[in-house]
Image (cartoon, rainbow, N blue to C red):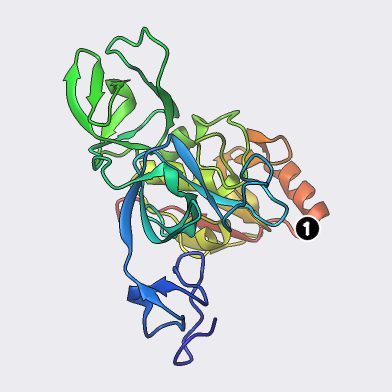
Amino acid sequence: MSQTDDETPLDPRIHPYRDDLAADFLEGRVEAKAFVPGQERRTGAPWTPVMSKPVSGDSVSGFGAADILQDTELLFGEAFTVFEDKDGWSWGQCGSDGYVGYVKSADLFATLPEPTHWVSAVRSLVFPDNKGEFPPLMSLSMMAGVAVDSVDGEYARLASGGWMFEKHLAALGDTRPDYIATASMFNRTPYLWGGRGGQGIDCSGLIQVPLAAAGIAAPRDSDQQADSIGEDLGVPGDLSVLLPGDIIFFPGHVGFYLGSGALLHASSHDMMVATHSLDVVVDRITERKGRGVTRVRRVVQGG
């Protein structure tokens, strides 16, 4: 793949192009054998991995392979633009953050109702009844989108079927400004590479999802976040000047500073979301990567 006109190369993580195929809106900016319009879909599964490549049926569990990673994941109701549907896999772009990858075609639907609400609990259940007395139909995680058809007592009826506890839902446009409180709700959630909460969450997911709940858009990967979120503080010589809510970046890692020398992060060391001493994390990563803190950014709200 080559760029046209000596432009800065486009990041393929957020621009849908390959040597053989690209989105029609990139024509003139990249070279490809064909340019196609996208088809809008929504995720109808509770969560579905977005893979770096399509996965053959003989791979482990139908997903994992040595060179095929889960890059991110879609949650129920989230949009996905499909540019190719082939052999059970759809290649396209996530609507929430523009990430590009491969999704199982069976998890995408053209007729799923457009969401009116988002799930504000870390996890909430969809029941077949409006009292929550029967075994649930599925479990949805924070930022999943649902269309509410009506409300009966404490439960909301979904246009896609089933009922959810209404207090676990927020109307589109409603926010939860205290993103540290939101991030803390994920405490002890399993660590999952590429996870955004469906089955687990990774370090950059723990930054992205709480900020999204606060109405602050953030890209998916930690290097992208280090270049874009809020104000860049560089690396203060004295980390004691940091404020609660500051985002601390390391080589391949990121977490929220809580104050008093504590870091909240999705830790692959413990394989879960945990709070650790910032000094301990710095020493551990420096030993492994040769460098500790690389950037600090401060979130700007209401600006």
- State which quadrant residue 236 falls in: bottom right
Q: Residue at x 31, y 68 (%)?
A: 37
Residue 141's x, y, as percent?
A: 44, 32
For numbered disc 1, what is the local secondary structure? helix
- State which quadrant residue 23 falls in: bottom left
Binning the other alpha carbons within 10 Å of mark 1 as few (below 14), some (14 to 19) or many (20 upward) gives: few
Q: Which residue of the protein is positioned furthest toward the right in this rendering?
A: 287
- Residue nearest the observer in this picture, 224 or 39: 39
Residue 192 located left or right of residue 209: right
Q: Which residue of the protein is positioned furthest toward the top in this rendering?
A: 133
Q: Residue at x 22, y 38 (%)?
A: 116
Residue 88's x, y, as percent?
A: 49, 51
The residue identified by callout 1 is 289
| In this view, 274 is above or below 11 | above
- Residue nearest the observer in this picture, 275 or 48: 48
Residue 76 located left or right of residue 275: left
Residue 216's x, y, as percent?
A: 36, 50
Kind of residue at badge 1: Lys
| In this view, 2 is above or below 245 | below
Residue 6 located left or right of residue 161: right
- Specify the quadrant that holds the N terminus: bottom right
- Residue nearest the observer in this picture, 291 or 167: 167
Q: Residue at x 54, y 56 (%)?
A: 221
- Residue nearest the observer in this picture, 84 or 51: 84
Q: Residue at x 55, y 43 (%)?
A: 195
Residue 214's x, y, as percent?
A: 36, 43
Q: How many numbered marks appear? A: 1
- Specify the quadrant that holds the C terminus: bottom left
Q: Which residue of the protein is positioned furthest toward the bottom in this rendering?
A: 5
The answer to whether residue 165 of the structure is visible from this angle is: yes
The answer to whether residue 263 of the structure is visible from this angle is: no
